[in-house]
Image (tube, grey):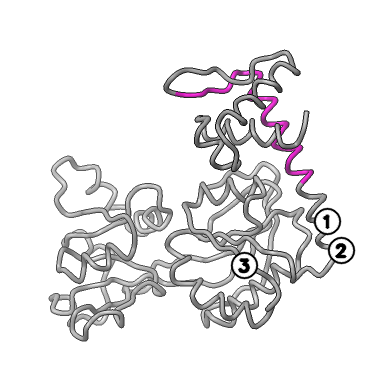
Amino acid sequence: MTLTELRYIVTLAQERHFGHAAERCFVSQPTLSVAVKKLEEELGVALFERSRSAVQTTPLGEKIIAQAQRVLEQAGLINEMASAGRDQLTSPLRLGAIYTIGPYLFPHLIPALTQLAPQMPLYIEEGFTGDLRRKLRNGELDAIIVALPFTEADVVTKPLYDEVFEVLLPADHHWSSRATIDKEDLLSERLLLLGEGHCFRDQILEACPAISHTLNNPDNTLTAEGGSLETIRHMVASRLGITVLPQSAIGTNHYESGLLTSRPFTPPAPERTVAIAWRASFPRHKAIDAVTHAIAQCTPRATTDTASVAPANGVGSA
C-alpha cells in the first residue's frame, strides 16, 4: 500500500469516474484502474462498485477511503512542516476565491502580494464555496477567500473587510433619479440573479425574503438568472433588467458614459463580510499574514483583524 494508491482511491471516490480520476492524477486510465484493483486485492475487499455508467463506493470502501484521506492529509502536513522550517515566503501558495470575489480582488491582490513577498509563487483558483471547502480540506488549496458565514472543523477564519451591496441600473432607468433604493422595490422590476449554487444569490434572497416567493411562483416573469456577475452586468447594460451587485463588482466605469449607473440601498443596506480561511494545521502563518496584509493594502474597506477557530463539529453554511 502506497500513498499514491491512496491518492488514487480518494480521487476516484470524488470523481466517480475512472477517466476523470486518472486525469486529475496525471496518469493513464489503465494505470489508475490497475492500481485500484491491486489495492483491493491486497486488502481483500471491494472498495468500489463498477458499472458502465458510474462508479460507486461500497459501504466498507467509504470508511477505508475516509481513513485514506486522513492519511494523505497527515502526509501532506509533513511536507508543510518541512517547508515551514525553511523560508515561509518562498514556497508556492495555492489560494482560492469564490466566483463573486476572485475576479474583482485578484487583479489588485497579486501586485500587492508581489511587493510584500516577491519570492513566493502564487497559484490562484476560483470556484463555488463548496468546491473550495473540499479542496481546502483535501490540501489542494492552502487558503480560500469566501463570504461569511463559513464554518468548518479545524479551519481558521479571519474576517478581512465588509462590502455593501448596490443596485445596478441602466442609466436611463426611472430609478436613476432616486438617492437610494428600498429592498422591497426590487419586486416591482425584472431582477437578474446568479443561478443556484452561488452564495451571493443566497445572500440577496436572505436580504429580501420576498424574492424567494417570487422565484417559487410558476408564473414568475420578474426574475432571470445569469451564470456570472459579468454576464448579469452585460444584461443590465442591454436593458434586460436590474440587479444587485457587491460594490467591488459594480464596474460602471467599464462601459460608455451614460450606459449604466448604480444606487445604494436605503439603510440599513445589505452587505457581506469577506474572510480568508485556512487549515488550523497549516504551518506557514507568515504566508497567510502576507496575503491579509496585501488585501488590506488593496481594499480600503478592510476593517477586521480578529481570527477564530471554527468548532470541531462546525457545519458549513456559506
Residue 243 location (% of width, % of height): 26, 65
Single out the mark in the foreground, 1 or 3: 3
Tag 3: amino acid: Leu
| Residue 214 can be seen in this image | yes
Sort mark 3 into few (<14), some (14-19) or many (20+) by Cα contacts within 10 Å.
Answer: some
Q: Mark 2 points at which residue?
A: 85
Q: Mark 3 points at which residue?
A: 122
Q: Which segment is the magenta one?
A: 54-75
Looking at the rendered structure, the secondary structure element under dot 2 is helix
Q: Mark 1 points at which residue?
A: 81
- Observer-nearest of 55 and 291: 55
Q: Which of marks 2 and 3 is nearer the N terminus?
A: 2
Residue 173's image quarter? bottom left
Q: Residue placed at 56% from the left, 80% from the top?
A: 111
Q: In this view, does 12 lie to the left or right of 223?
A: right
Membership of 158 in magenta stretch: no
1 and 2 marks in contact (CB < 8 Å):
yes
Residue 290 location (% of width, % of height): 68, 74
* Residue most extreme to the bottom: 257
Tag 1: amino acid: Met
Looking at the rendered structure, the secondary structure element under dot 1 is helix
